[in-house]
Each structure stands twice: as C-alpha cells, then as structure tokens.
Image (spheres, grey):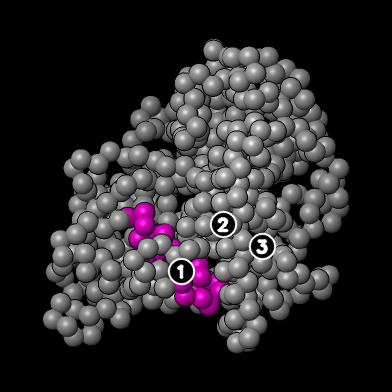
Amino acid sequence: MAETTARAAVPKGFRSAEQGWPALHRIPRPPYRLPLLGDVVGASRRTPVQDSLRLGRELGPIFRRRAFGNEFVFTWGSRLVADLADESRFAKHVGLGVANLRPLAGDGLFTAYNHEPNWQLAHDVLAPGFSREAMSGYHPMMLSVAARLTEHWDAAATDGRWVDVPGDMTKLTLETIARTGFGHDFGSFERSRPHPFVTSMVGALSHAQRLNNVPPPLAPLLLRRAGRRNAEDIARLGHIVDEVVRRRRADGHGDGDLLDRMLETAHPVTGERLSPENVRRQVITFLVAGHETTSGALSFALHYLSLHPEVADRARAEVDRVWGDTDTPAYEQVARLRYVRRVLDESLRLWPTAPAYSREATQDTVLADEHPMRRGAWTLVLIPMLHRDPEVWGADADRFDPDRFDPAAVRSRPPHTYKPFGTGARACIGRQFALHEATLVLALLLRRYDLHPDPSYRLRVTERLTLMPEGLRLRAVRRSARRAEIPGQRTDSGAAS
C-alpha cells in the first residue's frame, strides 16, 4: 500500500518531453521539423511503430519526435532499457496509445494507472489463476480448441485451399481464452465471418492507434464519424461481456476459472472483492489481451517456419521424439519442447506483438548516468529495436535464428535485453499461459502438417496497437504418419482416433 501511495504522488500530465527532460537538446531528432506539425516528413500514419523503427536505426538508441506540439522520447538501447527496468526509480507509464483504451477497459490490469487500487486488488486475486496447477487444468481445453482448428485446416488441405493464418489464429486464441477463462464458446470456427467481438475489438484497437496521429483538440472534429463507430464498438464489447457474466451468475460455478475468481474470490489480506464494473473491465482486458497478442505471435512463428523448412524439420523431429505416438500430449510434455519454444521466442524477438511499453520516473533521476529526468518524465521503449540492438544480438540481428535462445546463448546476454511481455511489476500476468498455449499449438500443427508459403508473399505488418502479419496465407499439407493425429479428430479412413 505504501508503494501505491508513493506512486500516486507522481505528477500527472507530462505529455511533452520538454517538461520532464532538462537536457532534451542532447537527444537526437529527425532533421526536417515543420512548424506546428513537427517531425512528420516521411512519417506514416498507418505504420507508426515501423516508422519509429526506421528512425531508431538512423538516430540511435535514444531519440525524440515532435507531433502536434508534443515532444516524445523513444528508447531502445539495451543499456538504457536495463536502467529503466529499475523498479526503485521507474514504473509503468500508461502511454497515449494505452490511455486511449481506457474508455474500453478503464482500470483493468493493462490500462490501470499505478495509483488506482483496483490494479493491485485484481492482480492479487487473479495471479493464482496462472499457477502451475491452474495451467495444467487449462491444458485439456487448449487441446480441445486446437482440434477445432485442425478440423478446419484438414478441410482446407482436402480442398487444396490456402489457410488464412492470422484469421485462424485469432479464432483459436479467442476460443482458448474464452473457454479456459470464462467457460464461454464464441463459435468462431463455425462462423463464415469473424465474431462481432473480434470485429469490435479490431475497431477499438485501430481507433486507439489512430488517435495517436491526430491533435487531441481536433480529434472530436476530425474523427467524429470514427468516434461514433468506436463508441458503438465499445458498447458492443461491453454487451457481449455482460452476457458472459450474466450467464455465469445464472448457471453457477465454472470450475474455478478466471471468471469464478473475479466473481467469488476476496483479497487474501483485505477481504476486498472486485466490483461488478471492474469485473467487466477485467473480462474485456483478458479477452482482448489474452488472444490478440498470442494470435500475432503464432502467425509470425508460422510465417518463419514456412520460410525455413530446415527449422520446421528440426522442430518437428523434436515433437515426434518427445511426444512419440501419444494421442494426447500431457501438460508436462509441452515444457520439454525446448526447440519449439526457441522458434516462438525468436519470432517474438523479431516481431513482439505488443511492440512497446512506457516507463516513467518516480523520482528525479539520471537515466544510464547520462540523461536527467524529472519525476513524472516518461519514455516509450521500442521493443523491436531493443531486440535488434547489434551490441546484444550481433550484426545479423534481423536474421531469424532460433539458436539465439540456446541456453548458453541466453546466459551470455545481459539481462533486460528481451522484453516481449513488458517489464517489472506490471509485466503481462498471462505470460506463462500464452507461452504454453503457443508452444502447444505450434507443436500440434508441426506434427500434423507440412507448411508451404505463398511464393509471392512478402511480409507486411499491420498495426492496431498490436502487430500482426497482414494477408499471410499458407498451404497446410497433411503428414501421413499416425503421430500427426490429435485426440477427437477422425483419421483419413473416417474412424475415430
């Protein structure tokens, strides 16, 4: 509680870096700056993260950009990021993109300000939902949803059709978090079009991203129609979540899942419970964050596996060796897929699907003994650039190589150089859930299919606060070996496996 009180005293409103960085003039900026508009020459409104990556390469490990009268500081150098990880001097800053989601998620775990008490309450109540015991309980449901995916891909393979990788991974991860966390089935694989939850979620995330590129005073005027659509999207998401909660209250317990914990568990020390309003916000947070980033991670990993058949063969051999002929891989067997996990880690290194996080100074300090910061000053950490820092990852940092995550290679790197899930006390609470789910799904798909890329495809990354490969499609060709089967699926002869 003392920590929360101390952080509540941090000044709010440091939106422009001049107020928080006394030596701002020492930080590089783009060369062409226009009056009023700022550093917009060559800028992209559709891909601001990738635009910032380009500037990071040109300007170095810390740089600044100005837009519509506000100055922003970006960091990516490993030494700077390691210093920002010091929880005694820095804390999470709810940056503009995240703050734009507060009309949707309020003081949910991801969007709460540090001084808001519901963050600590929800974290303490929900953390046991990601324990090893809880995770092993989710495993059979993950397998069940994966079987629905492979049934869908089997039909595409039989018909000789391409599979829509981002679309199908979104269906998979939405159903997984809905089933495991809230006992709900959206019926994604039975729909010819995305579930309204997905449509509204994409709309809300895209609107939050778009707000970053419009002067705040002009946003209500310039984005009037978009603002109305966003309000409709938020209302639709809230209505869907309210219905999920209503059904649970009517039906009773859900085997101790996340929703049960939200509705029935009191804080172990204070006895406080989450309010109905906060339950709604947490459910929205988990449904959005629990599937959007994981679907992107799986999509990028499948893209790289299709381009590197030697990596796919090595990963597939590990799956065959570790799982053998078992129809139902056990929870413990997933953790033994160390090379498959390296594939996932390397994909998240190159394209962390949550591409940035912000840190604010909780006291007057000097960043990395070089850049003075006043209390409340903040900076945006560009994770894809951190993950490409040549001082850490070498001159070939853009090359896909899962062996970068060989245990010896990991031990040789300094800490705080790999941050796909954020940092510190506010890092992603569902990290182990996401990693287990993604490793399991990659292994199941590798065991069942050979993955063939579209020769004409070149990776395009779409941005809606999270990152996702755009237009990615693959041919999934069934392997003939029996070990390619998944429980609940039918064999080619039609007999149940």
Vertical placement of 123 versus 83: above or below? below
> What crowding class fits label 2: few (fewer than 14 Cα within 10 Å), some (14-19), or many (20 or more)?
many
Residue 214: image quadrant is top right
Where does residue 464 sit, x and y in percent of width and height? Answer: 50, 45
Please, what is the dominant secondary structure of the magenta stretch?
A: helix
Q: Say which residue label 2 marks.
A: 233
Q: Is residue 182 magenta?
A: yes
Identify the mark at residue 281; answer none if there is no mark.
3
CB atoms of marks 3 and 1 within 8 Å:
no
Q: Is residue 273 magenta?
A: no
Of marks 3 and 1, the one in the foreground:
3
Indicate the secondary structure of the residue bearing disc 1. Answer: helix
Question: In front: 491, or 316?
Answer: 491
Vertical placement of 426 versus 11: above or below? below
Which residue occupies 28% across, 75% down? 486
Question: In front: 222, or 497?
Answer: 222
Residue 294 visible, this orientation:
yes
Vertical placement of 384 versus 288: above or below? above
Which kind of residue does numbered mark 2 sit on?
A: Asp
Q: How far is the residue under mark 3 from the one under mark 2?
A: 15 Å
Where does residue 117 sit, x and y in percent of width and height? Answer: 79, 58
Which kind of residue does numbered mark 3 sit on?
A: Arg
Q: Say which residue label 1 marks.
A: 176
CB atoms of marks 3 and 2 within 8 Å:
no
Which stretch did the figure color magenta?
165-186
Which residue occupies 66% across, 14% down? 26
Where does residue 225 sit, x and y in percent of width and height? Answer: 57, 45
Which residue occupies 63% across, 14% down? 35
